């Protein structure tokens, strides 16, 4: 199997850290608060992604996250910046 996309990694991280039922389908439009993720849960997820992907997310960036899509775009931007 090839490398996972950023979207797949984010979805996997959300499922692994927060024990969502596998029948729940995530979309980029899914709101973090509607998934039951509060600021502490979001920070825990970000710490996992930071460790796994060797990126750094600042508080002012994480405070702007509202949807899974926002998170995916932030991670993609961090990964793009680390390659440059």
Image (tube, helix red, strand yellow):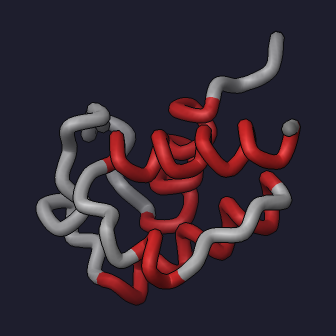
Q: Nearer the viewer, residue 84 or 24?
A: 84
Q: Quadrant of residue 41?
A: bottom left
Left-right relation of 16 to 24: right
Q: Position of residue 10 (x, y in %)?
A: 54, 45
Using the image, determine if residue 8 lies above or below residue 39. above
Left-right relation of 23 to 80: left
Instruction: Give the residue at x 60% y 43%.
Output: 77
Q: Position of residue 15 (x, y in %)?
A: 47, 52
Q: Nearer the viewer, residue 78 or 27?
A: 78
Q: Nearer the viewer, residue 6 or 15?
A: 6
Q: Position of residue 51 (x, y in %)?
A: 80, 67
Q: Quadrant of residue 6?
A: top right
Quadrant in which the C terminus appears: top right
Instruction: Give the residue at x 84% y 59%.
Output: 54
How many marks the image carries: the answer is: 0
Q: Which residue, as the protein is rendered here, is positioned at the far bottom?
A: 40
Instruction: Give the residue at x 80% y 21%.
Output: 3
Using the image, determine if residue 7 lies above or below residue 53. above
Quadrant in which the N terminus appears: top right
Q: Which residue, as the protein is rendered here, is positioned at the far front?
A: 84
Left-right relation of 12 to 51: left
Q: Which residue, as the protein is rendered here, is positioned at the far left?
A: 34
Q: Position of residue 30 (x, y in %)?
A: 20, 44
Instruction: Give the residue at x 12% y 61%.
Output: 34
């Amino acid at each position: 199997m090839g490398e996972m996309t950023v979207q797949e990694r984010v979805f996997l991280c959300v499922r692994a850290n927060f024990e969502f039922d596998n029948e729940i389908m995530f979309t980029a439009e899914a709101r973090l608060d509607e998934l039951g993720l509060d600021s502490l849960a979001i920070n825990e997820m970000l710490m996992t992604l930071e460790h796994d992907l060797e990126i750094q997310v600042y508080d002012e960036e994480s405070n702007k996250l509202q949807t899974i899509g926002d998170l995916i775009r932030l991670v993609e931007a961090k990964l793009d910046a680390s390659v440059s």
